Image (cartoon, rainbow, N blue to C red):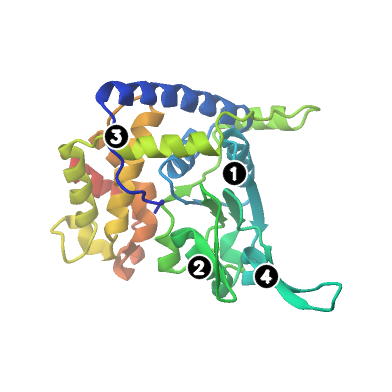
């Protein structure tokens, strides 16, 4: 989850609306800038931006070549964040991510250790093909993503703020991948599935990217402004009906706690982090789409990206050809019924 500050005094309604209107205008411009470079894929762009606006990390899942890396670098530019990229490989070591201590010697022959920061010291970290590295290396990111600091040789080093990880993952059927452990998956606010572009978007990609000049995004926000918007989102009121819908949805996805038909297909379900993620992302989605308060439709739209990596189907359900999307969509249907 994101960093939770001490509760700020609530703004009065007028000030809140003025701040929200300014944020709306900036988010509309952000959409435009990203759209210059990433064609189609509106859902993917939206969910990735929502993860960052909510103060969290996102896992982008899709086959190679669908512009996942390009999306992350474009977002880094448009959000005005200092970005680093790590290509995960089977021989990548934890120190290649976190950094390491080196021995220095001064002119008097005195030796001391000096810490050299690794690429994790960025505001936006792209972990490319995260499931190609060994579990030991994957877990080097765990502490950073959860606690916003790392420990090397017993010393604590704080990461920059804001700090967001956007990781990409190839589908697990592909050769040479290590599945991410459940504890690591839960650290991602959302799992965003990146699918093939539609016909018109793919035509634009062909025309735009094979000529002399390629489009580039301009910076719309900077780190401080992004932190302001993240703060604003945490202050947005959530109607009781939406809070209850979030609780109903998350609890209905847990076997043993739910009487829903879908629950019998679920081996294990989402914990409280899923509810926290829906509370934040529903507010962020409302703002992104030009509204000042989230609705049950926001919860329904975010159910799949927030829940799918926090639950698993039973063996029997998989054998019957059921997918996680089927189960979640039936949970959402009963929510809106």
* Residue 229 drawn above or below residue 149: above
- Quote the CA–CA distance across marks 3 and 1: 27 Å
Tell which of 36 and 261 is nearer to you.
36
Q: Residues within 10 Å of mark 2 (few under 14, many from 20)?
A: some
> For mark 4, what is the residue?
100
Q: Disc 3 vs disc 1: which is toward the camera?
A: 3
> For mark 3, what is the residue?
236
Q: Position of residue 105 (x, y in %)?
A: 81, 74
Residue at 51% over, 45% down: 194
* Image-based side of 147 in relation to 215, left or right: left
Q: Secondary structure at mark 3?
A: loop
Q: Which mark is residue 72?
A: 1
> For mark 2, what is the residue?
179
Q: Secondary structure at mark 1?
A: helix
* Image-based side of 140 in relation to 325, left or right: right
Quadrant (top left, top right, bottom left, bottom right) of the N terminus? bottom left
* Image-based side of 249 in relation to 132, left or right: left
Sequence-first disc among 3 and 1: 1
- Quote the CA–CA distance across marks 2 and 4: 26 Å
* Residue 226 drawn above or below residue 124: above
């Amino acid at each position: 989850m994101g960093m939770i500050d001490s509760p700020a005094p609530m703004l009065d309604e007028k000030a809140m609306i003025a701040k929200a209107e300014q944020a709306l205008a900036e988010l509309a411009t952000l959409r435009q800038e990203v759209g210059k470079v990433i064609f189609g894929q509106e859902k993917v762009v939206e969910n990735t931006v929502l993860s960052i606006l909510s103060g969290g990390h996102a896992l982008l899942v899709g086959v190679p070549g669908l512009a996942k890396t390009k999306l992350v670098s474009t977002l880094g530019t448009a959000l005005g964040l200092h970005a680093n990229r790590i290509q995960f490989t089977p021989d990548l070591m934890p120190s290649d991510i976190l950094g390491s201590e080196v021995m220095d010697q001064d002119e008097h022959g005195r030796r001391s250790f000096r810490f050299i920061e690794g690429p994790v010291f960025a505001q936006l970290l792209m972990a490319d093909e995260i499931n190609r590295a060994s579990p030991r290396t994957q877990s080097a990111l765990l502490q950073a993503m959860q606690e916003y600091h790392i420990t090397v040789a017993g010393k604590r080093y704080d990461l920059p703020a804001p700090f967001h990880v956007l990781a990409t993952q190839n589908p697990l059927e592909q050769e040479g991948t290590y599945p991410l452990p459940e504890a690591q998956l839960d650290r991602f606010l959302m799992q965003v599935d990146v699918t093939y572009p539609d016909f018109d978007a793919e035509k634009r990609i062909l025309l735009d990217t094979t000529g002399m000049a390629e489009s580039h995004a301009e910076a719309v926000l900077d780190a401080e402004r992004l932190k302001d918007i993240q703060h604003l989102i945490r202050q947005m009121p959530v109607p009781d009906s939406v809070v209850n819908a979030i609780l109903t949805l998350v609890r209905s996805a847990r076997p043993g706690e739910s009487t829903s038909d879908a629950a019998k297909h679920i081996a294990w379900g989402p914990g409280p982090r899923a509810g926290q993620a829906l509370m934040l992302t529903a507010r962020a989605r409302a703002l992104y789409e030009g509204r000042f308060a989230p609705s049950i439709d926001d919860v329904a739209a975010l159910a799949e990206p927030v829940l799918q990596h926090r639950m698993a189907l039973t063996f029997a359900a998989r054998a019957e050809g059921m997918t996680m999307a089927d189960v979640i969509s039936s949970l959402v249907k009963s929510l809106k019924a």
